[in-house]
Amino acid sequence: MTTKTALLATLVLAVLACEKGGETTPPTTGGETTETPTDATAGGEGGEAKAEPGAPDVKWADKTFQQRKEWMGVEVLPKMKAMFKEYDEAQFKGFGCDTCHGADGKDKNFAMPTDSIYPLPKDDPVKAAMEYDEAVTKFMVEKVVPDMAKLLDEEPYNPETKTGTFGCFDCHPTE
């Protein structure tokens, strides 16, 4: 895959957030746990229990920063890495947190959208991306956006109906 295709892949991630502004999305290296009371122990009986990493029963919007980092490491990173490597093993062999969040992601608390991803035009970003690289755009629109939306408890943005909560501009900056 060429640099052009890699830039487009980044662009398509942004396209996924088409009509929505971004919010902080921290990744993690995984394996971290946070001690929180469970429903059974919250009333004071039995003390505290370890929660599952990433708090899978807590919606993304309600997760703490630590839970979001864990969720990104345990669920998001492995799934997106596999998806991108399946699309193009050579281009995405080094897929990691910085692929989406940028080399300075940690310094910016993994805030999204990030300026390290290819910017998209505000008007019809999917059309512009298709003109740039149709294959990568289709991959982003058909696979990455729906799967990422599901992982973040969102609905994929549909440019035709203008419905959904996760699209291109959740990852990509605008031009």
Image (cartoon, rainbow, N blue to C red):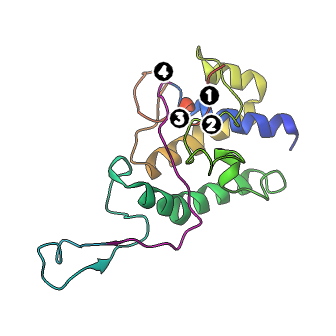
Nearer mark to the viewer, of 4 and 1: 1
Name the image quarter holding the C terminus.
top right
| Type of secondary structure dominating the magenta stretch | loop
Q: Is residue 141 magenta?
A: no
Earlier along the polypeptide chain: callout 2 or callout 4?
2
Q: Nearer the viewer, residue 7 or 109?
A: 109
- The location of residue 18, given as percent across then percent down, is 53, 26
Inspect the image, locate mark 2, and give the three-letter code of the amino acid beneath it.
Thr
Callout 4 secondary element = loop
Q: In the shown orientation, is residue 77 left or right of residue 75?
A: right
Query: Where on the picture, by quarter, is residue 39?
Result: bottom left
Please report the bounds of the magenta region as a residue range: 19-35
Earlier along the polypeptide chain: callout 3 or callout 2?
2
Q: Which residue is mark 2?
A: 114
Label disc, if present, on residue 170 of the rendered structure: 3
Assess disc 3: are there few (<14), some (14-19) or many (≥20) residues with their C-alpha within 10 Å of its C-alpha: many
Residues under numbered marks 4 and 3 in contact, where contact means CB atoms less than 8 Å apart: no
Q: Which residue is mark 4?
A: 160
Assess disc 1: are there few (<14), some (14-19) or many (≥20) residues with their C-alpha within 10 Å of its C-alpha: many
Q: Which residue is mark 1?
A: 173
- The location of residue 80, given as percent across then percent down, is 61, 54
Q: Nearer the viewer, residue 45 or 175?
A: 45
- The location of residue 159, given as percent across then percent down, is 50, 23
Residue that sits furthest to the right in the current view = 2
Label 2, label 1: how far apart the Cα atoms are: 6 Å
Inspect the image, locate mark 4, and give the three-letter code of the amino acid beneath it.
Glu
Earlier along the polypeptide chain: callout 4 or callout 3?
4
